[in-house]
Amino acid sequence: MKIILSAIALMLLLAGCTADPSMGESKPQNDTVVDDNSGTTEPETYPDLEPISCSSIFELGIESVSTEQTDAVGFSVNYLIDKKYKDNLVWKSQSNGTSAIIKLTKGALISDVLVSWLNPNISHYYEIHVSDNLVDWQEVVVSGSSDPDSLIATRINFDEDGTGAITGRFVKFTSLGNELNDISDIIEIQVFGCDRTVTQNIELIDWYLSVPTDVDNNGKSDSIYENDLAGGYFDPRFFYQSIDAGLVFRTNVRGFKTSENTKYIRTELREMLRRGNKSISTQGINKNNWVFSSASATEQAKAGGVDGVLRTTLKVDHVTSTGEDYQIGRVIIGQIHANDDEPIRLYYRKLPNNSKGSIYFAHEVLGGDDVYREMLGSRSDNASNPSDGIELGETFTYEIKVVGDQLDVTISQNETQLAFERFDMSGSRYGSGNQYMYFKAGVYNQNNSGDSHDYAQVTIYDLVNTHN
C-alpha cells in the first residue's frame, strides 16, 4: 500500500512541475517535461519574445549559468555570477571557443555586458550571441577585444561594439583567448539592460560626477559635468540606475584619482550650485559654492548659499574585504569639502567578520588634524560586531547640517533617529580665511591596498541639498 501511495505522490509531483502554457513563465534551463504517451523526456522549450522597448538601464537578474564542456577542477562556471570578485574564484575557459551560457531571470532588452578579467592588463578576445529560446542565436558582438588599462572590468556596449541592444533571455559569451594564449580567466560577468522603464528622482543638474577613468589622458580621473550627468550619463562599471529606482555608485580599489594628492579612488558627486552655467568657476567664493554664516557679510553676499543641509537616503551594498587592516571595509559616503580641507567626512565601515557596519565622522581642523566622533559602533580595526550598526543592503538616512560653526549629524532609519552628534567648529576657522564649501556624496573608497578587483558600492535613493 505504501509503495502505491508513493507512486501516486510522485506522479502528482511530476504533473505539478509541468509548465502551464498560459502562464508564459519558463522553468530552469535543465528542467524536462514528460511526454504522457511515451514516458520519455524532452528538453524544456522557451517561447520567442516580443521586442521589448524601455529607456532605463539597470543590472539584470541572472538565474543560472552553464557551459557546454566540463569545467576544470576548481574553476567552476558558477563563479561567473557569484558576486564575490575573488582572485581564486574564477572560471577558466578550457580552450579557444569555450562558451558560457547565461540565463536571465526573465526576458529583457539587453544593452551591455560587463566582464571582469583576472588579468586586465592584456587584451582578451570574445564573441557574444543572444537568444530567446536556446536554439536560435543572434550574433551581437564579433571579434570583440578588451582594452588593457588600469580598470578591472570591460564594458561591452552593444550599441558601440555590436549590432545594438537586443531582446533576449540567454547570453552566450564565447572566450577566444587573449594576446598571450588561448585561455582567459574571468572573475565575473554582469548583464545590463531593462525589461521596463524605471525612473529615479535625484536632481542631477546640481552635481557633477567623478569617475575613475582617464578618457582625456590628462593623468587624472574624468568628470561628468552637470548637463551631461543630468542628460542620462551611464557606465555600468561605476554609475547606473538600480531596478528599485536608485542610483548605484561603485569604485574598485584601482583606477585613476582626482589629483596627485589624493590617495584613494572614488565615484562621487560634487555639488554644483551653478547648475550647468559654465561661465561660473567651480572654485572660489562665488555662485557655485557656499559659505558658513560665520563668514563675513561680504563673503556671504558673493556665495551661492549660506549654511546648508545634505539629506541622503541610501544603502551600502558592498565594502572591501582585502588589504591592510586599517583600510578594510572603509568607505566615505558623504562630505563637506572646503578649499583644501574637510569640515566633515562621514564614514561607513563593516569588517569581514561582522554582520553590521559602524558609522562615524571625521572633522578636519583647517590646516590641522582630524577629530573623530563615533556614532554607531566603533571605527577600530578589530571592532566587535556593533549591536546598533547597519547591515549591508539595509536602507538608512544621514543628514549633515551646518548653521554657522555648528555641525549636526543625524543617522535615522524608517523615520526613527538612531544617532545624533553636535560638533562645535568655532575653533576650526572655517568662517574666516576665504573658505568656500560644497557637499559630496557617493562612494569614496578608503582602501588602496586590497585586491585590484575588490570594490565598494552604494545605492542612493534620495539626495537633497539646501542652503539659505
Image (tube, rainbow, N blue to C red):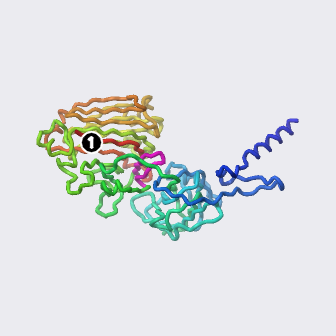
Q: In the image, 169: left or right of 410? A: right
Instruction: Point out residue 342 in the picture as x, y percentages from the top left corner.
Output: 25, 42
- Is 273 or 354 nearer to us in this picture? 273
User: Within 10 angstroms of label 1, few (less than 14), some, or many (20 or more) residues?
Assistant: many
Q: Residue at x 45, y 44 (%)?
A: 318
Q: In the picture, residue 423 is in which quadrant?
A: top left
Magenta span: 237-251
Q: Is residue 54 visible?
A: yes
Q: In the image, 116: left or right of 230? A: right
- The local secondary structure at tag 1 comes to strand
Which residue type does callout 1 highlight?
Answer: Ile
Instruction: Point out residue 270 in the picture as x, y percentages from the top left corner.
Output: 29, 48
Instruction: Point out residue 286 in the picture as x, y percentages from the top left corner.
Output: 18, 48
Q: Can you identify the residue that label 1 sits on?
A: 336
Instruction: Point out residue 446 in the picture as x, y percentages from the top left corner.
Output: 35, 45
Asked if residue 250 is among those painted magenta in the image, a careful observer would answer: yes
Q: Residue at x 60, y 52 (%)?
A: 64
Q: Residue furthest bottom?
A: 143
| 255 over 316 or under it: above or below | below
Quarter the N terminus occupies: top right
Q: Is residue 221 visible?
A: no
